[in-house]
Amino acid sequence: MPKQSVIPAGTGKPLAPFVPGSLADGILYVSGTLPFDKDNNVVHVGDAAAQARHVLETIKGVVEEAGGTMDDVTFNMIMITDWANYGAVNAVYAEYFPGDKPARYCIQCGLVKPDALIEIASIAHVGK
C-alpha cells in the first residue's frame, strides 16, 4: 500500500519539508508536533500544560483525519526543554490517554523555537 499524506484542514505551512502525518498499511506516523498556531508562532508561551494540550489537540486532529482516535495511538516520543515541566505535561497527557496507555519515551532537549516547551511525535494503528 502506498503512503498517503494526512493534512487536516486549516493546517499551516510547516517550517521544514514534512507533512503532519503519513499513513501506510494502516499505520499513521504523526510528525513532531510543536505548540504552533497556523502561522508557526508559539502559543501559550511559558505555560507547559497549555502547550501540551495544544500539541495533543493537534495530534488528535491528525489521527482523526486519518480515521482513527487517540485510543489508536500506540507510541509517543516526547521532547521537553526542562524537566521542571514534566509533571504539568504528564497531567495533561493523562487526560488524552485515560485507559490503556501508549508506550513512550521522554527526553530533555532544545527545540526549534526557544518559546516552545514541548514537542510530541506519535504512531497510531488506524487500519482494520
Image (cartoon, rainbow, N blue to C red):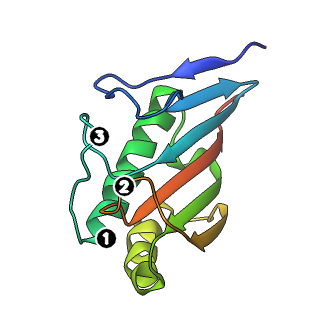
Tell me the CA gap for discs 2 and 1: 17 Å
Q: Quadrant of residue 7?
A: top left
Q: Is residue 40 left or right of residue 58?
A: left
Q: Amino acid at mark 1?
A: Ala
Q: Is residue 6 left or right of residue 72?
A: left
Q: Nearer the viewer, residue 125 or 121?
A: 121
- Mark with earlier residue (3, 2): 3
At a point 22% along the width and 64% down the height, the residue shown is 45
Q: Nearer the viewer, residue 107 or 4?
A: 107
- Mark with earlier residue (2, 1): 1
From this view, report whether residue 97 is shown above or below residue 89: above
From this view, report whether residue 58 is shown above or below residue 91: above
Image mark for residue 49: 1
At a point 25% along the width and 42% down the height, the residue shown is 37
Residue pointed to by mark 2: 113
- Mark with earlier residue (1, 3): 3
